[in-house]
Amino acid sequence: MSYQVFARKYRPQTFADVLGQDHVVRTLRNAIEKKRLAHAYLFVGPRGTGKTSTARIFAKALCCKEGPSIDFDPNDELCIEIAEGRCMDVLEIDGASNNGVEQVRELRDNVKYAPSRCRYKIYYIDEVHMLTTGAFNALLKTLEEPPEHVKFIFATTEPNKILPTIISRCQRFDLRRIPNAVIAKHLLHIAKLEKVNLDEKAAYAIGKGAEGGMRDAQSMLDQLVAFCGEHITEQDVLDVFGFTSGEAVAQLARHILESDTVGALRAVYEQNEAGKELGRFLGDLIQHFRTLLVQQADPEAAAEDLSPEVAEEVVAQAAAASTEQLLRIVDGLAEVDARMRWASNKRLHFELGVIAAVQSLNEVSISDVIDALDGGSTAALPKMAQRPQPAALVRRTVEPAKPQPAVVREEPPVPVAQKVPEPAATVQVLAPLEEAVPETREAVSEAEFWPQLIATMQERRPLAVSWLQVGSMLGITRNVIKVGFPPTESFARDSLLRPAQVSFLESLAEELMGKAMKFEFVLDANLKPPAFSEIGLGLMDEPPPAAKPVPIPKVEAKAAPKDEAKKPAAPEEPAPAKANDDFYNDPLIQSAMVKFKAKLVPTG
């Protein structure tokens, strides 16, 4: 017998041989057992995932001697004819070369004839999306109401090119990409049968390169046996197909997550010098960061496509970065991937993308700012993003003095009799802003609680007190404080519901009430929304309108008559009265002057 490639020699022959498509196999088996057979089926999936093999197995189950049956003998004469494509009642048609109206009309004329040996006459059309629109339309009526002895099975890799009227007349089955672990295990099984020593790492490398296609993986193994002989290592796989090892990809990702720009650039250089395709290397890197995201969400799903060595590294790297940081890295690398496809200097774009990925880890995001505001300090921000601000320092001194850094000076020892304590007023300390340590106080009553809570909030977190001020305390039941908000103030309620704010408010309530308290924030339609005016901001509702100056017409100077010169001068207008000191000292007026950088102008 002539030599057969692995893809044909180890093609699945029964439902049990189909790997990675359990959802399809289970549905077909149940349909056969319960005799709920449709007249048309559509298999959709990437190349090499088992569409043709599943169609042939289904045809064997329908046309076997005691069929339809799921427990057929694959070595039966009729099943062998179907597997080899020689059965007269199971017709395999290539949609790419038989895509015209004339071929479909011929098929439509032949469906009325009964099968010669089998129970059903089965038409299997591969790459059915290649049929023309006219051919599809010619097939519609026959496909919708075929004779009882006819079954249609279609297969395609591009279902979007099939008319919706065709898809609606079929039962659709979507075949998935086969996981790397399943492919690697099957390749090791084939190698054992062929008496080939295949390393486990090499099997995973082949599965990764096959991208979910079992046929591609078997063809690659066939090529490696011809190249290497009876022993195949991972390095052989990388050398023959130009792949990058999973460890190399994980190492580059580790350099990026550790902000090691030099190490990341060196890794890119080494792969480029080794002749690896940088476009594929970048694709593997993006896939690796995608695996880290999946690891954070569903660890079991992430482990399906990983070798045991890389799986441990993925777990460690997934814990070293936040989801938002990983998303920023993936977005940046995806943009680099789009540019590299048309760039002549791919290494340059790859290196720029790696540098940008390292820098993106130190960027401050909106969530970081919100967490910092909720915490009342900048401790939640990344360390690289924090910059010393002069405003963050407060001088605590009695006597005015110029800002100086705190310096500890060692003075020479002085005899005990001559030691005189220095006045505390001359001590100057520069310290970062910190939340004041709550003082121990007696528990307040329920009537005093709400104003005390707002006052304490104003003192310790002035940025968040405005959210609390628009609410109203509805009551205290046991240890639950119910606070209501008008429906128009849902934003304030949502802001206080953030975990950091709730924790802070509960600590304040426990401090005031002397026991652990919980908060319940609700929207109450009976509460009147606050008036939107400058009173809510600590300012006046409407400042008095300033008097407009009246223009004085220019008059040319003329010699006054002697009589008029003797007339007494007109009395001067009295100067405007100065504003009352109480008016200037009013807190609202002072707040308005500071906020708007204005000054009061007396009017007549």
Image: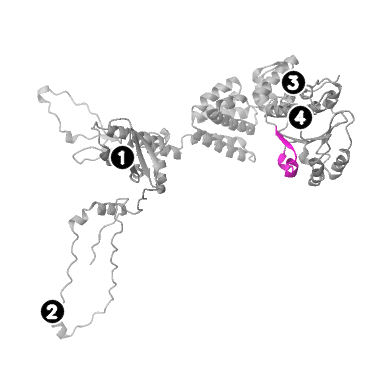
Question: Which of the two residues, 286 or 179, is positioned nearer the viewer here?
Answer: 179
Q: Which residue is mark 1?
A: 457
The amino acid type, in three-letter code, at marker 4 is: Lys
What secondary structure is found at the residue carrying circle 1? helix
Contact check, label 3 and label 4, Cβ < 8 Å: no
Q: Position of residue 525 (x, y in %)?
A: 40, 48
**Which one is closest to the eye, mark 3 or mark 4?**
4
Q: CA distance from mark 2 to mark 1?
A: 67 Å
Q: Quadrant of the N terminus?
A: top right
Q: CA distance from mark 4 to mark 1?
A: 72 Å
Q: Earlier in the sequence, mark 3 or mark 4?
A: 4
Q: Which residue is mark 3?
A: 227
**Label 4 neighbourhood size at 10 Å, few (<14), some (14-19), many (20+)?**
few
**Which one is closest to the eye, mark 1 or mark 3?**
1
Query: For residue 395, which quarter of the picture?
Result: top left
Q: Is residue 437 visible?
A: no
Instruction: Give left or right: position of 372 versus 229.
Output: left
For residue 296, above or below residue 162: above
What secondary structure is found at the residue carrying circle 2? loop
**Which one is closest to the eye, mark 2 or mark 4?**
4
Q: CA distance from mark 2 to mark 4?
A: 126 Å
Q: Position of residue 202 (x, y in %)?
A: 66, 20
The amino acid type, in three-letter code, at marker 1 is: Met
What secondary structure is found at the residue carrying circle 4? loop
Query: For residue 307, which quarter of the picture?
Result: top right
Q: Earlier in the sequence, mark 1 or mark 3?
A: 3
Q: Which residue occupies 60% across, 34% down?
A: 347
Q: Which residue is mark 2?
A: 568
Q: CA distance from mark 2 to mark 3?
A: 125 Å
Q: Which residue is mark 4?
A: 35
Q: Which residues are magenta?
A: 158-174
What secondary structure is found at the residue carrying circle 3? helix
